[in-house]
Amino acid sequence: MDAGSHSISSGKNSAAAVQRPPLQEAGSRPYMPPLSTTSRNPAAKCYGDRFIPDRSAMDMDMAHYLLTETKKDKENAAAIAASPSKEAYRRLLAEKLLNNRTRILAFRNKPPEPENVFAADTVSSHQAKPAKQRRYIPQSAERTLDAPDLVDDYYLNLMDWGSSNVLSIALGDTMYLWDASSGSTSELVTVEEDNGPITSVSWAPDGRHLAIGLNSSDIQLWDTSSNRLLRTLKGVHESRVGSLAWNNNILTTGGMDGRIVNNDVRIRDHAVQTYQGHSQEVCGLKWSGSGQQLASGGNDNLLHIWDVSMASSMPSAGRNQWLHRLEDHMAAVKALAWCPFQSNLLATGGGGSDRCIKFWNTHTGACLNSVDTGSQVCSLLWNKNERELLSSHGFTQNQLTLWKYPSMVKMAELTGHTSRVLFMAQSPDGCTVASAAADETLRFWNVFGTPEVAKPAPKASQSGMFSSSFAHIR
């Protein structure tokens, strides 16, 4: 069990908290200008640091000749002038030796001037590989909203951002929708006190239908465009449903009973497969981008990888065998994130007694790397546009940390929350990250920058599929 977790509360906090309207501006932190950086002056001349001495002064034959000539001139100038043989020798020596001095310790070709070398290298290097400017990462949240009655429970999953750019967040017994395009807030549903509080939420791929898990073990399916309850799934679990994950028309649910169930929302007998491998609450569920593998994390410190190909060979609603059972984490495994640029790469985070982010090859089950973050890992998100990973943490700093992958060098630490950052969700374009913490605030961070190519809009056919499927089974 994760030491930093709290038991679930009813969501009814102090009277002062109740009076606060949900998802209203709480005031942003003052803007912090980017840190000033010193850059090297490109106009400054550089002559290099290599020095090759001129060794003509060390010409031993020439030195001997000059010394000898000087001495003889002083001692017997008349005799030298009267001796034609010695005069001829002197001229010959000067022509052969003095005229060839530059050949000694000389380059075959004359080297270019240092200034020309620097200019040529600079131009060619810029043409070959233009320098990439480092992205500026704002250190403060762009927007802060109040989130009163947010349940402080590490094992729940109370926030999700759909493909229609609407953020859903559960505050106690009530599900709120915040439209990122307009900034407007609406209340979807307040569940009965006997069924609440809400314990999990997940958008369907169409961005229109929303699944809500309850403390009573029921699962509700809503059409958010018409604010209609389409279906309630009962009897799937024996206790609260803390995690949800969609794979096309399959809604996978994880409960405190340790069971994982695949529910086909198109048919009346929805429970089609069961994964049994956890002995305690399932607090993390994520399907891979291909929809072929499911990762599940539990309060039993276990991480399982389930494969569709193995499940399809088993009888319906039967127990399926895991592909990998991984026991490296020393605390609850809630934070799960599949890599967007490598299909078999999974990042996982452990609770307060573990504090590690681990990377896995889900084909082989090998642990590729493990990084001790120093604090409880609550959530993980990959950057869709760069090779970066964002993690949210609990005690002691309650921060968000941006890592460069695969070096795992810290690029930025975003602070502002005063309690553990339990949940994170990413906007459809991959730029903005929303974080919700036990301090009852919801903050938005422009941490992933601007994508080069806009993502295509979700297909309308998916929405029609869900509507027609729910219509005949209500």
Image: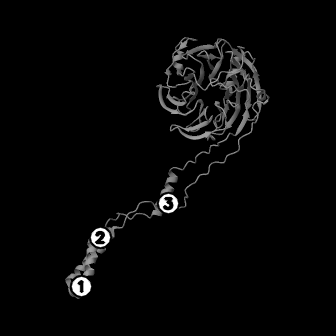
Q: Residue at x 69, y 45 (%)?
A: 31
Judge left or right: residue 346 versus residue 31: left
Q: For numbered disc 2, what is the local secondary structure?
A: loop
Q: For numbered disc 3, what is the local secondary structure?
A: helix
The image shows residue 251 at horizontal and vertical percentages of 63, 20
Residue that mark 1 sits on: 75
Count of numbered labels shown in the rendering: 3
Residue type at mark 3 is Ala
Judge left or right: residue 361 versus residue 456: left
CA distance separating discs 1 and 3? 56 Å
CA distance separating discs 2 and 3? 35 Å
Q: Quadrant of residue 300?
A: top right
CA distance separating discs 1 and 2? 24 Å
Residue that mark 2 sits on: 59
Q: Nearer the viewer, mark 2 or mark 3?
A: 2
Evaluate if marks 2 and 3 touch, with contact meaning CB atoms under 8 Å apart.
Answer: no
Q: Earlier in the sequence, mark 1 or mark 2?
A: 2
Q: Foreground: 28 or 291? A: 28
Q: Which mark is residue 119?
A: 3
The image shows residue 288 at horizontal and vertical percentages of 56, 26
Q: For numbered disc 1, what is the local secondary structure?
A: helix
Q: Earlier in the sequence, mark 1 or mark 3?
A: 1
Q: Which mark is residue 65?
A: none
Q: Foreground: 187 or 394? A: 394
